[in-house]
């Protein structure tokens, strides 16, 4: 295997790319508001697992790319997720010691903060109103964390990403 494919960035980038694809994939209107925050979940996992590799800079870059792909106001998601990744990175040692269920609850709290920041910025820029629909992804993301955490941990261990 070549040196490029043994690099940790290669495997981390592939998982982030998969999360971006899942984030922009079209869904039926009935379940569109329940779409989990895939990119946020993947970045939060890598921030907890490898905070020296994935941090605020990675979050800013990924979310600027997603802002461009989704056609939203540039930088809104990047700022919101960088705050959440900062809180996660500063507490990663505590978060590692929690069970997956406790982590799912904390991820839900972090994603509530993420969606509130997005709402505040959009309220300031676009004059939008808060609705319960904007918090549905928090519930689904917390539930998907219970599945995504073991999958990404197995991926990290199988390919020895350090």
Image (cartoon, grey):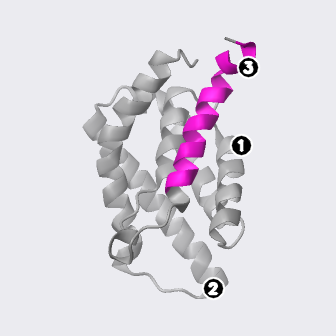
Residue interval drawn in magenta: 2-22
How far apart are the two marked residues, 2 and 3, measured between alpha carbons? Answer: 44 Å
Q: Toward which corner of the image does residue 75 lie, by quadrant?
A: bottom right
Q: Position of residue 62 (x, y in %)?
A: 66, 50
Residue 122 appearing in the image: yes
**Disc 2, SS:** helix
**Disc 1, SS:** helix
The N terminus, quarter of image = top right
Q: Position of residue 148 (x, y in %)?
A: 38, 39
Q: Which mark is residue 4?
A: 3
How far apart are the two marked residues, 2 and 1, measured between alpha carbons? Answer: 26 Å
What main secondary structure does the magenta stretch of the protein show? helix
The residue lying toward the viewer, choosing from 156 and 96, is 156
Q: Toward which corner of the image does residue 102 lie, by quadrant?
A: top left
Confirm or deny contact between disc 2 and disc 3 (CB under 8 A): no
- Which residue is depicted at the point 48% across and 65% down? 115
Confirm or deny contact between disc 2 and disc 1 (CB under 8 A): no
Residue 21 highlighted magenta (yes or no):
yes
**Disc 3, SS:** helix
- Which residue is depicted at the point 51% across and 50% down? 40
Label 1 Cα neighbours within 10 Å, binned few <14 / some 14-19 / many ≥20? few
- Which residue is depicted at the point 44% across and 81% down? 130
The C terminus, quarter of image = top right
Q: Which mark is residue 126?
A: 2
* Residue labelled with disc 1: 57
Residue 33 appearing in the image: no
* Residue 4 placement, left or right of 54: right
Residue 77 highlighted magenta (yes or no):
no
* Residue 8 placement, left or right of 158: right
- Where 138 falls versus 131 (above or below)? above
Q: Which mark is residue 101?
A: none
How far apart are the two marked residues, 3 and 1, measured between alpha carbons? Answer: 22 Å
């Amino acid at each position: 295997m070549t040196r490029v494919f043994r690099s940790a960035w290669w495997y981390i980038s592939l998982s982030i790319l998969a999360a971006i694809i899942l984030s922009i994939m079209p869904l039926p209107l009935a379940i569109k508001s329940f779409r989990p925050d895939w990119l946020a979940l993947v970045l939060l996992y890598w921030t907890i697992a490898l905070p020296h590799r994935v941090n605020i800079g990675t979050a800013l870059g990924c979310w600027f790319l997603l802002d461009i792909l989704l056609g939203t106001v540039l930088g809104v998601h990047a700022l919101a997720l960088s705050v959440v990744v900062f809180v996660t990175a500063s507490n990663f040692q505590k978060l590692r010691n929690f069970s997956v269920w406790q982590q799912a609850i904390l991820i839900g709290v972090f994603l509530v903060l993420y969606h509130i920041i997005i709402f505040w910025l959009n309220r300031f820029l676009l004059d939008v109103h808060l609705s319960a629909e904007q918090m549905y992804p928090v519930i689904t993301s917390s539930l998907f964390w219970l599945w995504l955490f073991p999958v990404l941990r197995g991926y990290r261990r199988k390919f020895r990403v350090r």
